[in-house]
């Protein structure tokens, strides 16, 4: 079964539990500028920017997608540790790129300045990198 990418607007209790598990595995730098995983999730839910990858009715990965008037920015991409290396992150990235292209907007990856993992990911995807 494929991983379906969706905008999370009204998460069920199970979705909230899954999101907490996804970001519980996140390194501290990934949560910047938020104080905690919970603060990141609540902020993204409040402004409608939280996207997630769903497989068998469970959320396995999530990210923040800010859909600006001139550019879209993807940040805070995280996949639950238990399901990493299975294509969930790739699926989130590919679908985000497709949606941005369909909307005629350039996509940029946003991450803390100077972070090597984010810089390497942006280079592999041929995406510009914006500091958070």
Image: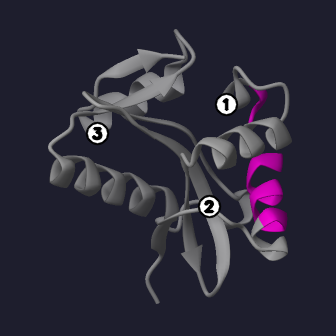
Residue 54 sits above or below residue 76 on the image = below
Q: Which of 100 and 90 lies nearest the eye of the viewer? A: 100
Give the mark nearest the N terminus, 1 or 2.
Answer: 2
SS class, disc 3: helix
Q: Give the distance between the C-alpha atoms of the residues marked 2 and 3, in whole angstroms.
A: 27 Å
Q: Work out whether residue 25 can be spotted.
A: no
Give the mark nearest the N terminus, 2 or 3.
Answer: 2
Q: Which quarter of the rendered picture does the C terminus lie within?
A: top right
Residue 116 sits above or below residue 63 on the image = above
- Dominant SS of magenta comes to helix
Residue at left offset 66%, top offset 70%:
59
In the image, the segment drawn in magenta is: 16-28
Q: Which of 46 and 117 lies nearest the eye of the viewer? A: 46
Compared across the picture, whether 67 is left or right of 47 comes to left
SS class, disc 1: helix
Q: Badge 3, how many Cα within 10 Å: few under 14, some, many 20+?
A: some
The residue indicated by pointer 1 is: 30
Residue at left offset 68%, top offset 44%:
46
Relative image position of residue 6 (x, y in whole percent): 49, 67
The residue indicated by pointer 3 is: 125
Relative image position of residue 27 (x, y in whole percent): 75, 34
């Amino acid at each position: 079964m494929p991983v379906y990418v969706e905008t999370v607007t009204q998460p069920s209790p199970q979705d909230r539990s899954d999101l907490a598990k996804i970001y519980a595995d996140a390194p501290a730098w990934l949560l910047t500028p938020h104080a905690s995983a919970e603060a990141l999730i609540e902020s993204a839910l409040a402004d409608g920017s939280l996207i997630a990858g769903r497989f068998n009715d469970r959320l396995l990965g999530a990210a923040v997608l800010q859909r600006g008037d001139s550019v879209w920015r993807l940040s805070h991409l995280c996949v639950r540790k238990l399901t990493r290396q299975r294509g969930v992150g790739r699926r989130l990235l590919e679908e985000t790129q497709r949606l941005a292209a369909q909307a005629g907007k350039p996509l940029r990856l946003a991450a803390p300045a100077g972070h090597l993992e984010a810089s390497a990911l942006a280079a592999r995807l041929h995406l510009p990198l914006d500091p958070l």
